[in-house]
Amino acid sequence: MLKAIAYKLAYTLLVVWGVSTLVFCLFSILPGDPSRMMLGQRDNEQMRLTIQKKYGFDKPLLQQYAYFINDLVPISIHSTNPDDFSNLAKHAYSVVGSIHTKKFDVVLKAPYLRESFVRKGVSVSSIIANTLPNTFVLALTSMSFALVLGISFGLVCALYEHKFIDQFLSSTAVFGMALPSFFSAIIIAWLFGYVYQKHTGLSMTGSLYAVDDYGSGETLILKNLVLPAFTLGIRPLAVVLQLTRNSILDTLQEDYIRTARAKGLSNFRVLIFHALPNALNPVITAASSWLASMLAGAVFVEFIFGWNGIGKEIVYALDYLDLPLVMGAVLTLSICFVFITIFTDILYYILDPRIK
């Protein structure tokens, strides 16, 4: 098991390097001059050249890539030459330790995602650190809602196969899977946050924290989580319901289930303690995939509901062409996706002894 986990972690490092390279290449071939984007109406040749030199846009593409990777990796190498571009970002690093030689400095640090083009002097890491937890809260709440109801309804459908309740829930699940999040977000926000607002007490927009009008700090408002979490959880709920139902029905045909019933165990005990644990593998796979995709797919939902998460930041960054923030956000979400997948694989070893 430890060997398999070590292999997975080594594979993860290669995937992260590949994602980093892909993100750099995608945003490097975009048309337009980043220095002109940053200057806007203040554009002049002297200022443009200054910006290009500051951010290394005047360097060859391969050299820019080397600087980009050097900023990302936990251990970076810098020339002792003060005119070298790689030294310009060192003052912004969160340095843990360093080793100095005559020609090179080796720095142990947190990954550096550079500074925002639009928010002068604000690091991309700080923006992501402030918004990513809100997105995680939204995604985890949505996934928990989908898992609890999806597995419960799936059990009911399997228990009453081909009955009215099974057909009704299965048909509703198909409708839920076909419902786009951006469309359902608009309808749900309008319906429950405006039309029936007096009955629900919910708002059309709002984030997890709100700034107090009297300047006494931020206030936690959990009710703002209800509508976006419900909207984001509709589609995975439908998938989990169908997977749970079909997986349990397949598991109930196994020999060990017939043996358990022959021992006189009740249907409820057979279903809950024998069939369900062995039927959860495809559900776990779907849940991990949906949780990872929720981090990226929450963009529309966060924007519509005004949820201050990383998805909303991506929309604003694209609107203002803030490339470092877009690159940092995409890279962060990709790494989260990779690590969630690895965690799922490790969870398989724990839940299913046959994999060992």
Image (cartoon, grey):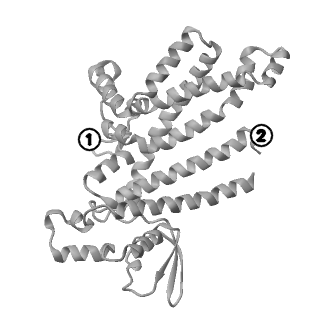
The correct choice, above or below, for 198 with respect to 335 in the image is above
Q: How far apart are the alpha carbons under marks 1 and 2? A: 58 Å
Q: Are marks 1 and 2 in contact (CB under 8 Å)?
A: no
* Residue positioned 35% across, 44% down in the render: 308
Most distant residue in the top direction = 164
Coordinates of residue 90 in the picture (x, y in percent): 42, 75
Where does the C terminus fall, quadrant-wise? top right
Horizontally, is 330 left or right of 252 in the view? Answer: left
Three-letter code, disc 1:
Asp
Residue at numbered disc 1: 213
Three-letter code, disc 2:
Arg
The correct choice, above or below, for 316 with respect to 120 in the image is above
- SS of the residue at dot 2? helix
Coordinates of residue 20 in the picture (x, y in percent): 47, 61
Horizontally, is 290 left or right of 346 in the view? Answer: left
Q: Nearer the viewer, mark 1 or mark 2?
A: 2
Check residue 320 in the rendering and tell me which mark sits there, or answer none. Answer: none
The correct choice, above or below, for 212 with respect to 66 in the image is above
* Residue positioned 34% across, 77% down in the render: 59
Check residue 354 in the rendering and tell me which mark sits there, or answer none. Answer: 2
Q: How packed is label 1: few (under 14 Cα within 10 Å), some, or many (20 or more)?
A: few
Work out whether residue 91 can be spotted. Answer: no
Q: How packed is label 2: few (under 14 Cα within 10 Å), some, or many (20 or more)?
A: few
Coordinates of residue 125 in the picture (x, y in percent): 41, 59
Which quadrant of the structure image shows residue 114?
A: bottom left
* Residue positioned 23% across, 63% down in the render: 37
Which quadrant of the structure image shows residue 67?
A: bottom left
